Image: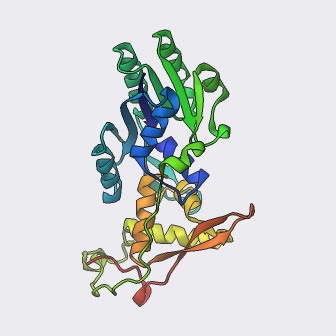
Amino acid sequence: MKVSVFIDGQNFYRSLQRFDDSLRVDYDRLASWITQTVGGPAAIFAGAYYYVGVSADAPPLVEGFLKGLELRPGYFVRRELRVKRTGRCSVCGGDNEYTTEKRVDTRLVADLIHYAAIGAFDAAVLVSGDDDFVPAVEAVNALGRQVWVATWSAGELSSDLRVRCFGHLQLADGLPSFRAERPARVTERVPPRAAPSRLARAAREPGAPLPLTAIERGLEELRRAEARLPHVGRGYFVMRWKSHALPPAGPEREALVQQLVDAGLAEEFPVTDADGRTITALRSRPAEGGGVALPG
């Protein structure tokens, strides 16, 4: 049996963060576990397709992750350019630009049906619980191929999608097989060479508002979250904190948060949430000199 995997990247990442925001996945072993769970030990891995919307100015960490995924045997990344939108901030009343995914789901649907029609797989595993994929699953079923659905929890799976799929994989069941050890973070840093802010070097009109960099906006939003919440969970800030001033929830915002931590502007610490779980939280740290120190 040939098994292919189709991953809705944004859905997968958000679900992973909700399930365990400290979990890291070995994607080679994930593909192997899915393939053998669906088709048995003799099953053939026929490829994994990862669909994601990417901004033109996405942080290097995002592109680094996607390129690393493409280098894995059998993985193919389908990028679609995120489109810009404008929204009004509910706090300050100002207009902010943000980006949203476009054509990602339709690209996945087109590939799923195309590869089913040419016999590229006997069984497809759709890593998403979104019921928007119901018509695509029905089309693949009509072509005589199996479609399985995989989610981190049953609560994230549409009942309409589940009844049309051949079977359901609970990704949490495979954690012993594909969990990746998270490398320890470096807590001691060599103090960086003092450098003037790029903003300070830019010419400005008298009285004109200072443009904020992505790092400054991120730090400002973290402090706003701290003022409103008893603690700011890293996963919550990355996936659920609503702000047009930040990159879209998911890998791009995760990359920004990591930049804040690496720059010493924010730090992680463990807290116990209302359910008694230990989670990773964020808090801001005062920058030397009283402002945001940008790379020189």
| Residue 231 position within the rendered picture, expressed as x and y whole percent measured from the top left | 64, 70
Above-or-below relation of 167 to 204: above
89 and 150: which is toward the camera: 150
Above-or-below relation of 106 to 260: above
Taking the image as drawn, is residue 160 in sight? yes
Taking the view exactly as shown, the residue that stands out farthest to the front is 41
- 116 on left or right of 162: left
Above-or-below relation of 213 to 98: below
138 and 217: which is toward the camera: 138
Q: Quadrant of residue 115?
A: top left
Taking the image as drawn, is residue 83 in sight? no
Give the colour scheme of this rendering.
Answer: rainbow
| Residue 50 position within the rendered picture, expressed as x and y whole percent measured from the top left | 39, 38
Look at 56% across and 55% down and name the residue there. 242
Q: Quadrant of residue 3?
A: top left
Quadrant that contains the C terminus: bottom left
Above-or-below relation of 70 to 39: below
Quadrant that contains the N terminus: top left
Look at 50% across and 43% down and name the residue there. 12
Taking the view exactly as shown, the residue that stands out farthest to the bottom is 289
262 and 97: which is toward the camera: 262
Look at 75% across and 63% down and name the residue there. 274
| Residue 223 position within the rendered picture, expressed as x and y whole percent measured from the top left | 55, 73
Report the number of discs.
Answer: 0
| Residue 138 position within the rendered picture, expressed as x and y whole percent measured from the top left | 53, 15
